[in-house]
Amino acid sequence: MDQALRWATEIPPVTRYWSLSIIITAVLTSIGLCSSNQFMFSIERAFGRQPWLLITSFCYYGSLSIELIVSVFFLMRSSRYLEESYQTNKSLFPIKKVRQLSPRQWREMTKWIDSLKTLDYLYFLFLVCASIVAVVTLGWHKRYFTVWKLGPILNDAILYIWCKNNPDVVVNLMGVLGVTSAYLPWVYTIIDVLFSLEFQKDVYELFSGRRGSHLERLLSFFQKVATQPYFWKVLIRYGVGHFWWFLGNFSPQLFYNDQNDERRKVQEKEGSRRREQRLLWESKRFNIIQYIYGLIMLPPWYRFLISKVSKMEFPDDQDGTGEHGNDVLVQDVEVDLENEVEVPDLEATENEDQIEDAEVATENDQVRNVEGARGTENQVQDLEVDVENIEH
């Protein structure tokens, strides 16, 4: 019992309570205390007299079954790893406010970021859930599809994001089959579709039909599949998952790393020529995209915290401001400070080099003197030999 309790406490809070709520709703519907209609998503009721369905629809996967256990297992694995590694991107903070922070104030802000990881992950799940509700509502109004259980869609979106962030991890499916995480979402989708009753029914009609040619029956099969709920569920799962994965990984580089050198120069100095005016307008539009992106992706409490931290005073700060627009610059400052502590004595190094050069020169002179002495001895020996020859 203690070991099970210890294992449960090791699971991050958001993943732990989410998994627990799924099990509770499954037990309540299995024993008959609650009806499944009280948890499933309905647009008319969710945006009417039962707004709690916007939350409970993500916590209901169905009654107790083997499929539910497998879903909770994948949920706990993918959501746990994603929650443990999730951290708010520091480039999302307003650049103007960050530049006003000193290195000590920025280190204090970094501590807040590390301590609020759980709350930041909950905010990220809120954004993903809101996008799922928006897509499902749009599909219902356009009469494309109707989805009653939003929890499995969120689970698959989280699984997709985790697999995209860790594409080289090998995952064992129930201890039988090892699959690289880059292909895990598609393997899971194929298994889910193959065991779907709607898909099995469509395949049976394809092979048992007697009307029309094989090509006509095949085209009719694909047309019917494109209108089935399981097809739209797959599109929603990986469409939403890929969208938020892209925003979290590639968008900061696209929105904050302006690679147009001319536009960056115009941002610093406005010109009067037509070409500079065009580039200036592009830079303003670029800044608007930055602002909207940061407004959505940055949790709202950080705007309050950064104002609070900017008002803090520390004794080791010489000035209340600094030119540290992001964490990279702050890290460079810290490295410079460390290098200043261990600065070598350049004068002593130069003196040592001069002494070494003098020693080398002395050794070279000695070698030359020895070689000169040897040459003189050889000349004397040659003269003695010549004298002896003359005498003979």
Image (tube, rainbow, N blue to C red):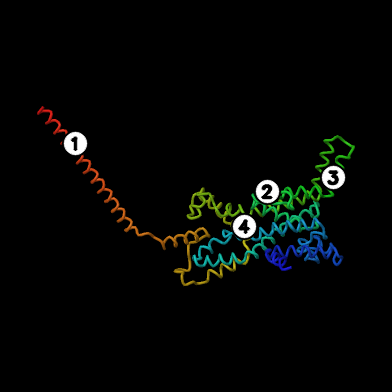
Question: Who comes first in sequence, dot 3 or dot 2?
Answer: 2
Quadrant where the C terminus sits is top left
Q: Earlier in the sequence, mark 1 or mark 4?
A: 4
User: Earlier along the polypeptide chain: callout 4 or callout 2?
Assistant: 2
Closer to the camera in the image, 225 or 166: 166
Q: Which residue is mark 4?
A: 293
Calculate the distance from the C-alpha at mark 4 to the C-alpha at mark 2.
32 Å
| Pick the front one: 353 or 108 | 353
User: In this rendering, is residue 88 above or below 214?
Assistant: below
Residue 312, image x, y percentages: 52, 71
Q: CA distance from mark 1 to mark 2?
A: 81 Å
The percent coordinates of residue 118 (x first, y second) are 65, 64
Residue type highlighted by circle 1: Asn
- The outermost residue toward the right is 210
Disc 2 marks a residue whose amino acid type is Thr
Quick check: 204 above or below 291?
above
- Which residue matches tag 1? 378
Mark 1 crowdedness (10 Å alpha carbons): few <14, some 14-19, many ≥20: few
In the rendered image, residue 383, in percent from the top left (x then y), is placed at 14, 33
